[in-house]
Amino acid sequence: MRATIHALAALAALGLAGCAAAARSEPPIGDAESLVRAMHGRYADSWYRTLSFTQATTRVLAGDSTHTEEWREWAALPGRLRIEMGAPAEGRVVIFANDSTYVLQHGRVVRRNDRMNPLMTVGFDVYRQPPERTLDQLRRQGFDLSRFHLDTLEGTPVYVVGAERGDTAGKQFAVEAERLLFVRLLEPVPGQPGVMQHVWFRRYEPLAGGWIAPEVEVLVGGRRVFHEVYSNLRANDTLDPELFAIPAGG
């Protein structure tokens, strides 16, 4: 009996030592830079390179009526996303590429701006591009990387970048502490002082060595105004580069 107890104690000690070694294998997270590096380090060798899906998009209109239409999306990570909205005959397309946004109508660029998609940056690209590039993009998107804290959202421990504890008025994003997955973007609504927009990634599930949140919810002033549900999810397919090509003159 005594020998058995000693053997179990030795195994337990080895197990604890193994856990401690595993814990030491990932650098501690204490600021925005170490968080971005940890996110990239966790999934850089496994996260999918391409993604496509069909999206049921519901918008809340005046009087709380709703309108739902089908969108089709293709992503090549990092940095490129194509969204076709509504019926193909409508010709409504948005392309995110070259750190810019292009709005197309029937194959012609009708609007271009230098706005990047922060959801692409912190929800997808962070896992497939060098951390230095992600950090640079976050600065350009208006996140104050010097502000960082630990918090809890809906009972889940998270890291928050862009705000100190208790600040709910600054542009910020939250990353789940355990799986290092983006969960919420919080930002002021332009032209509406004091009103905040919350974008939530919901119901994460595994996908091809990474993760996908097949439900996205947008709330403004606490009221849901936009809702996305994904289906027909595919990863690592070969995508035609023409999907992300910008027409001449764009």
Image (tube, rainbow, N blue to C red):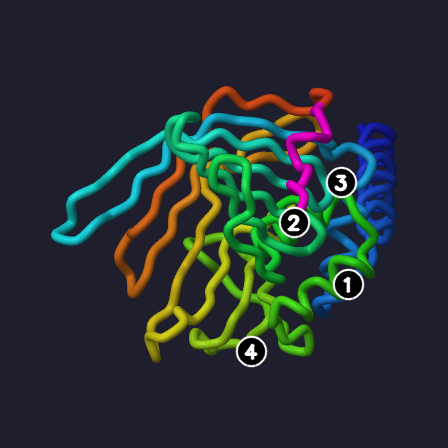
Q: Quadrant of the N terminus?
A: top right
From what the image shows, is residue 161 above or below residue 236? below
Residue at (65, 24) in percent of width and height: 235
Q: Residue furthest left?
A: 63
**Residue in the foreground of this view, choosing between 96 and 246:** 246
Amino acid type, mark 2: Gly
- State which region is magenta: 239-250
For marks 4 and 1, give the CA distance.
17 Å
Q: Which residue is mark 3?
A: 43
Would residue 85 be found to the left or right of residue 148 on screen? left
Amino acid type, mark 3: Tyr
From what the image shows, is residue 206 above or below residue 26? above
Residues at discs 3 and 1 in contact (Cβ within 8 Å): no
Would residue 244 be found to the left or right of residue 4 on screen? left
User: Upstream in the sequence, badge 2 or badge 3?
Assistant: 3
Q: Residues within 10 Å of mark 4 (few under 14, many from 20)?
A: some
Q: Position of residue 114 (x, y in %)?
A: 62, 62
Residues at discs 4 and 3 in contact (Cβ within 8 Å): no
For marks 3 and 1, give the CA distance.
15 Å
Q: Which residue is mark 4?
A: 164
Q: Which residue is mark 2?
A: 249
